Image (cartoon, rainbow, N blue to C red):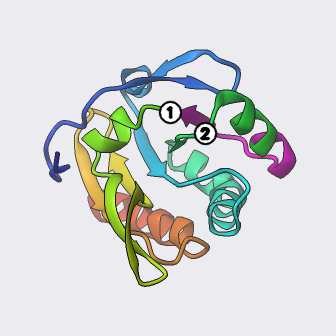
Amino acid sequence: MAIEEGAPAPDFTLNDARGNAVSLHDFRGRDVVVYFYPKDNTPGCTKEAQGFRDLWPEFEKLGVAVIGISPDSPASHEKFASQHGLPFVLLSDPDKQVMERYGAWGEKTLYGRKTVGVIRSTVWIDPEGRVVKHWRRVTRAADHPAKVLETIRAAKQAAA
């Protein structure tokens, strides 16, 4: 399924690091950044998560919630969040159903080989639940959180 900018974001409910059910509609009324990543505690995923962590105060000032989603278990997420001081929600999608609906699961090229797996991507959803921006394939995980913040900040300044 393709995520369309301007269209409603598909709702979902997944478990967080403590096993609590968290739904996208729980965040209605505020902007949400949902980022999809392959695996806890791998180099690129750790750098991306740390980037969102380091910029967390700026996202908060703009009223933006951050949600990370991977196929890892809630226990893995709890350890990952604790080790790296991650202040945002991590959700577990072991069946990859949400990832498939968001175009974050499928064929990709890894080290020159075609494979099937998590496609590192990000979706910015507005307070009404509509997709504002979809970064379909993130190539530089460490730099990506700053680009997301810059895009949101510029859009909010332009709208003010």
- How far apart are the two marked residues, 1 and 2, measured between alpha carbons? 6 Å
- The residue at which mark 2 appears reads as 72
- The residue at which mark 1 appears reads as 94
Q: Is residue 146 magenta?
A: no
Relative placement, left or right, of 148 versus 29 is: right
Callout 1 touching callout 2 (CB < 8 Å): yes
Q: Look at the image and tell me in which quarter the C terminus lies.
A: bottom left
Mark positioned earlier in the residue sequence (1 or 2): 2
Image x and y of residue 152, in percent: 40, 60
Judging depth in this view, the residue of 107 and 77 nearest the camera is 107
Outermost residue, bottom side:
112
Image x and y of residue 67, in percent: 53, 41
Number of residues whose C-alpha sits closer than 10 Å to that of mark 2, classed few (under 14), some (14–19) or many (20 or more): some
Q: Which residues are magenta?
A: 81-92
Task: Indicate the quadrant where residue 121 lies.
Answer: bottom left
Image x and y of residue 49, in percent: 65, 56
